[in-house]
Amino acid sequence: MSIHAQNEGRKGLLLVSPTFAYAILLLAAPLVLVILFSFWTQDYLDLDTTPTLANYKEAWTDPLYRELMLRSLRISVLVTTVTVLTAFPVAYYVSFRVKERKALWLFLITAPFWTSYLLRVFLWKVILGYNGVFNSALLWAGIIDEPLQFILYNVNAVVITLAHAWAPFAILPIFVALEKIDRSLLEAAEDLGDGPVRRFFRVTLPLAIPGVMAATLIVLIPTVGDFITPRLVGGTEGLMISNMIQVQFGKANNAPLGAALAVSSMFIVGGLSLLIFLASRRVGRVAGD
């Protein structure tokens, strides 16, 4: 290797080192600490560092924890489905129908980020409340005789709030995938006699799959561990595994069990994400053929 190449390598390493150290300090180190905690036991203030699998046994066998994990996965999958299905038409419209000022549309799509996430959750609490905006509007229109009670403090409220909060994260990757589609392919399909619906399912949708899968992962992974939304609008029916983890680290003062629940959640979500990734690659190969 030449001296010039060695110098370039040192410069590159010097540039990367601060970022790498930052990632190790703030990402890898806390994760390693959580994993270590999950193999320990705690009795109030006494922490026993003897390795044990008792926390994982309790996390995987206790019916309460299993139910919370399954509920979290169900809510996350439902939120992801709703978000992607509603985000695709928006991304499609901006990509194919908007001819000018696309940047303005993208700017408006990201407008919710201007406000605090916590504030947006509180606003949905006001909208969906017993005497909130939604119920008041339905009562004023004469559609209902009394306020609806099933739209707040349950799974429905969690899904609605999370779907709204993560919509921009789903719209943007789908939009990027749609923008990369060669319009001449659609013209060729039209020349061959394909109608709008057939062109969409044979050309547009297969080529947009990478963006759809990216949006799916972007929404699915963080919503499983969301804590604020279930706590504020979910009630007892909408609580998720993240809320139980917070209880274990806080009120229950059992950090090892909370760490085991957290690691178990990461393991399950990681496996599910890997399956989605492999499925997207398979679909991409089929679309390419």
Image (tube, rainbow, N blue to C red):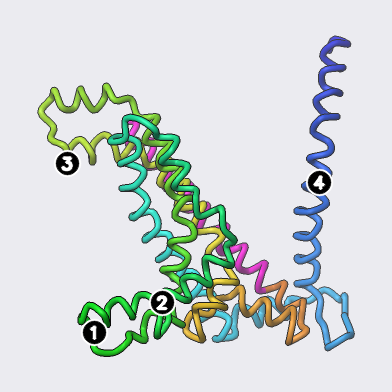
Mark 2 or 4, nearer chain start: 4
Give, as a three-letter code, the residue at label 3. Answer: Val
Circle 2 sits on which residue?
A: 128
Circle 4 sits on which residue?
A: 22
Mark 3 or 1, nearer chain start: 1
Closer to the observer: label 2 or label 4?
A: 2
Query: Is 15 situated left or right of 277 in this image?
Result: right
Residue 251 vs 121, above or below: the answer is below
Q: Residue 144 got which mark?
A: 1
Q: Secondary structure at mark 4?
A: helix
Mark 3 or 2, nearer chain start: 2
- Where, by quadrant of the figure, is residue 192 drawn? top left
Q: Residues within 10 Å of mark 4 (few under 14, many from 20)?
A: few
Residue 17 is inside the magenta segment = no
- Quadrant showing the C terminus: top left
Closer to the observer: label 3 or label 1?
A: 1
Residue 10 vs 201, above or below: the answer is above
| Spatial separation of the CA atoms under disc 3 and disc 2 | 36 Å
Where residue 62 sits: x, y (%)?
Answer: 59, 85
Circle 3 sits on which residue?
A: 197
Magenta span covers which residues? 261-289
Residue 213 vs 130, above or below: the answer is above
| Spatial separation of the CA atoms under disc 2 and disc 1 | 15 Å
Q: Residues within 10 Å of mark 3 (few under 14, many from 20)?
A: few
